[in-house]
Image (cartoon, grey):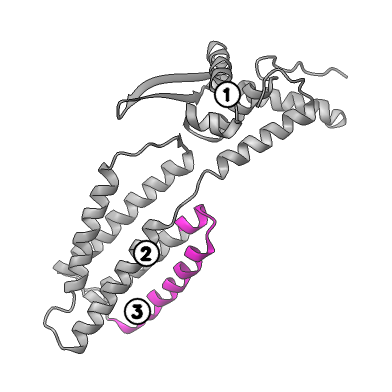
Amino acid sequence: MENDQPLSNEKSMEIIHQMINQAKTNITDNGLSWLLWGTMLFLTSLATFCFISIGAENIFLGWNIFGLVTIVLLAYGIFKPRKKLVKTYVGDLMKLVDIGFVVSVFTVIFAMNIAVNPNSGFGFLLMVFSFFMLVKGGAARSKVLMIPGIIMWRQYKTQQHQSSSITLC
Amino acid sequence: MEFKELDPILHSQLRLAVISLLISVREAEFTFLKEKTNATAGNLSVQINKLKDAGYIEVTKQFSNNYPQTICKITKKGIESFEAYVNALQSYMNPGTE
């Protein structure tokens, strides 16, 4: 882009629209973290199914490992050096959504290990996950995230019908 | 009908592009602006300095992982000037509506 070209009013408006759109399209997601998360969830669910099938004593062992791996990945994500070329207001908001999600998930998991019925707790986890997927999917304009988020909400309702109410000590 | 005067600082292709980018983000690095505007580093640097001297943007120079980093951020004066510029443009393009 040169600077000394004569600038018409129409050209000015075109530049403004073009640049604002350029900044908007910068909010992207390479999907790697979602693929990793999905794979981990699948393997953990499969492990839980196997534990139930063989009548293992601790059927939630897979989820405990899942939690530990998640903590390690989160720590790596926070502390790894990265070069961020631009900071957006939406990016700031999404960071807060990420923090809220992680705190909510770990609070529910902690509660499930202390006092809350695991079936009820799992329903709450589904609800938090679906909320997170809906918000992140909306920000990235990704139906691949939004639709499963809505489906998980449906699963949450089903889960709540099946499980008993939460019992806190 | 009286037309509003277009701000000469903003009525320039590259400076307008930089301000339009910065209005949409909280802050942006020099390389981001260079990539989005397709400008040369030298030209962009000159135009950024002009915007800075006019008080339209803040420029912070720092080091990140031993690499120099120039971060640009639009100021309140920059936002007001951009809004006034867009209003003036609209009054030129749609004279009947003002």
Chain part drawn in magenta: A135-163
Residue at image coords 48%, 33%: B26
Q: Are marks 2 and 3 in contact (CB under 8 Å)?
A: no
Query: According to the image, label 2 marks what residue?
Result: A129
Give how far apart the Cα atoms at labels 1 and 2 are: 45 Å
Give how far apart the Cα atoms at labels 3 and 1 are: 58 Å
Q: Amino acid at mark 1?
A: Thr
Q: Residue B98: in sight, yes or no?
A: no
Q: Is residue A23 left or right of residue A11?
A: left
Give the vertical position of A29 relative to A143 (above or below).
above
Query: According to the image, label 3 marks what residue?
Result: A159
Q: Position of residue B47 (x, y in %)?
A: 58, 17
Could you tell me which secondary element the residue under label 2 belongs to?
A: helix
Subunit ID for the residue under disc 2: A
Q: Amino acid at mark 2?
A: Phe
Q: Position of residue A108 (x, y in %)?
A: 25, 64
